[in-house]
Image (cartoon, grey):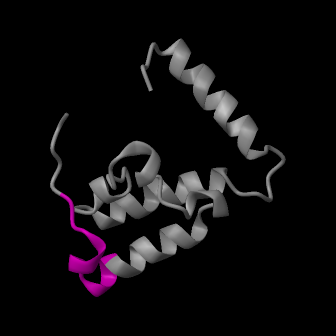
Amino acid sequence: MAWIKTIPFPEANAELQKTLTDLRAAYPIEYAASTAEQTGTEESIVESHTLIPTAMYHAFAEFAALMSPDLPLQRRHHEMIATLVSVTNSCHY
């Protein structure tokens, strides 16, 4: 597995902490709970972008907007689309 330098929330400066907090608030509620118990790790795709906070914000704010519960697709539809795209692209995850 690749190693990527990250800045954990407690070590982040005020600007990065605000960005991380704003992103978490924008995501649907089902993303609020940690999956560490199921996956065995606290690794985070969002945290892997902490070295470039501006890029991290724009990339993940877009994703949060696309996952908005105000849109007509439900979470299960998003998961079905993601699964089909992964299969089509021969991704293992």
The reply, left or right, for residue 56 in relation to residue 78 is left
Q: Return the x and y of residue 51 as percentages of the image width and height.
A: 21, 62
Looking at the image, which residue is at 32% across and 59% down? 47
The reply, left or right, for residue 70 in relation to residue 24 is right
**Residue 52 to residue 59: above or below:** below
Q: Within the magenta stretch, is there residue 73?
A: no
Q: How many marks?
A: 0
Looking at the image, which residue is at 59% across and 62% down? 27
Q: Return the x and y of residue 14 as percentages of the image width and height.
A: 30, 86
Q: What segment carries the magenta color?
A: 6-16
**Residue 86 to residue 65: above or below:** above
The reply, left or right, for residue 53 in relation to residue 2 is right
Q: Within the magenta stretch, is there residue 9?
A: yes
Front in this rendered view, residue 67 or 36:
36
> Could you tell me which quadrant the N terminus lies in?
top left
Front in this rendered view, residue 15 or 10:
10
**Residue 88 to residue 3: above or below:** above
> Could you tell me which quadrant the C terminus lies in?
top left
Image quarter of residue 52: bottom left
In the image as oriented, which residue stretches furthest toward the right? Answer: 72
Looking at the image, which residue is at 32% across and 50% down? 41
**Residue 49 to residue 39: above or below:** below
Looking at the image, which residue is at 65% across and 64% down? 29
